[in-house]
Amino acid sequence: MSSSSYSSSSSSSYSNPPCAACKLLRRKCLPDCIFAPYFPAEEPQQFANVHRIFGTSNVGKLLNAIPPHQRQDAVNSLAYEAEARTKDPVHGCVAAISVLQRQVIRLQKELDDTNADLMRFTAKPHSHQGYPPGMEFVSTMNQTAAAYGDNQQRVSVNEYGLPLPAAADRSPSFYPEVVDADC
């Protein structure tokens, strides 16, 4: 009798190739195999990593416990964690997360510094922050003199915060001679 049941089961055999899980475990892949939709035969290393880290039984229990529409996401997470654990057995994907968090913090600081520079360079020309380096003293001197009612001569500055020549230096000989190009 056992020979007849064996032959009847072989006549109704499943003809599709085995999934990566069944291939690795060297078992027959049945039509209702829980692993077949998520571990195709073309990606055997993915299941090998998951099997090595989590175990086939645990993965099967997990897949059966969650709704079918969430299984692909669960398999993707398991595969990512298994690959990360293969590369870094101690920290796994936490190491990658830490690297990315440090990169975000560094880039946020760089963005904050750049925004501060931008604000400083686009400030009003009368605030000392808008002046080129070394020229802040001109604005500070004028503000201090005005605050104390100092009647001493103030330093005049142009729209870029650069000091203008003193009144005595503004004679026509101070300015360069303009030569007519048509002559």
Image (tube, rainbow, N blue to C red):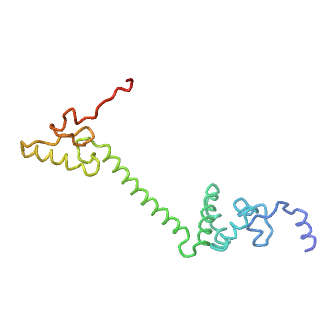
| Residue toward you, 76 or 132 | 132
Q: Which residue is depicted at the point 82% across and 62% down? A: 17
Residue 83 location (% of width, % of height):
62, 68
**Quarter of the image where the N terminus is located:** bottom right
| Residue toward you, 169 or 126 | 169
Residue farthest to the top?
182
Q: Which residue is depicted at the point 43% across and 57% down? A: 107
**Picture quarter containing residue 36?**
bottom right
**Quarter of the image where the C terminus is located:** top left
Say whether residue 122 is left or right of residue 67.
left
| Residue toward you, 46 or 119 | 119
Residue 48 location (% of width, % of height):
70, 70
**Picture quarter containing residue 126?**
top left
Say whether residue 49 is left or right of residue 18.
left
Residue farthest to the front?
183
| Residue toward you, 96 or 116 | 116
Residue 141 location (% of width, % of height):
15, 48
Residue 33 location (% of width, % of height):
74, 63
**Picture quarter containing residue 59?**
bottom right
Up the image or down, 172 lies above or below 76; here it is above
Residue farthest to the bottom?
90
Label total for image: 0
Q: Which residue is depicted at the point 6% across and 44% down? A: 150
